[in-house]
Image (tube, grey):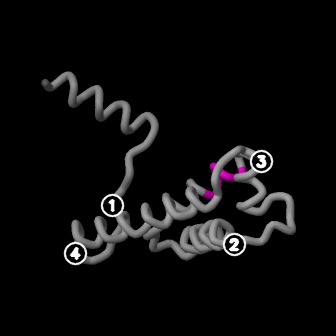
Amino acid sequence: MLAVLQDAVVCFQEHVQSTCKRKQAMHRDAEDWILNRDQSYPFSFENVCEALGYDAEYLRKGLLRWKEAAVDSRTQKSGSGQRWPVKRGAAATAERSVNQAQK
């Protein structure tokens, strides 16, 4: 169940301002799942959070606040609403190593 929740959060956050239609759809699907309060199916957001011991409403509100801040921040930085790239994994580690070595 944790993997289901994690995948939804990743899709929600990583594709929030994507220009790719497929990624936009992934964001919308994740957002719809997060906002849906239906508990009639086992893998609903509400049921997954409950099984993991998380407060669904708290997590939902936090994700929506994050989205609002991310959209506002990216719009202000770029002036055009374009998404800034996020470095992850090996690229981020390599960049940190270079920055530390330069200090």
Residue corresponding to mark 4: 79
**Residue carrying label 3:** 51
Q: Quadrant of residue 82?
A: bottom left
In the image, what residue occupies the spot 45% across and 73% down? 19
- Please tell me which of labels 2 and 4 falls first in the chain: 2
Task: Find numbered disc 1 in the image and state the secondary structure of the residue it sits on.
Answer: loop
* Frontmost residue, 99 versus 53: 53
Q: Position of residue 17 (x, y in %)?
A: 43, 70
Looking at the image, which residue is at 59% across and 71% down?
22
Q: Is residue 6 magenta?
A: yes
Q: CA distance from mark 3 to mark 4?
A: 42 Å
Q: Residue 9's image quarter?
A: bottom right
Pick whichever, 26 or 61, lies toward us. 61
**In this view of the protein, which residue sits in the foreground, 3 or 21?**
3
Does residue 30 show up magenta in the picture? no
Q: Amino acid at mark 4?
A: Gly
Q: Between disc 3 and disc 1, whose residue precedes?
A: 3
Marks 1 and 4, how far apart in space?
A: 11 Å
Circles 3, 1 touching at the beta carbon (< 8 Å): no
The amino acid at mark 3 is Ala
Q: Which residue is mark 1?
A: 84
Span highlighted in magenta in the image = 4-8
Secondary structure predominantly adopted by residues drawn in magenta: helix
In contact (CB < 8 Å): disc 1 and disc 4: no
| Circle 2/circle 1 CB separation < 8 Å | no
Q: Is residue 26 above or below residue 10?
A: below
Coordinates of residue 62 in the picture (x, y in percent): 49, 59
Disc 2 designates what residue? 36
SS at mark 4 in the image: loop
Density class for disc 3 (Cα within 10 Å; few <14, some 14-19, many ≥20) is few
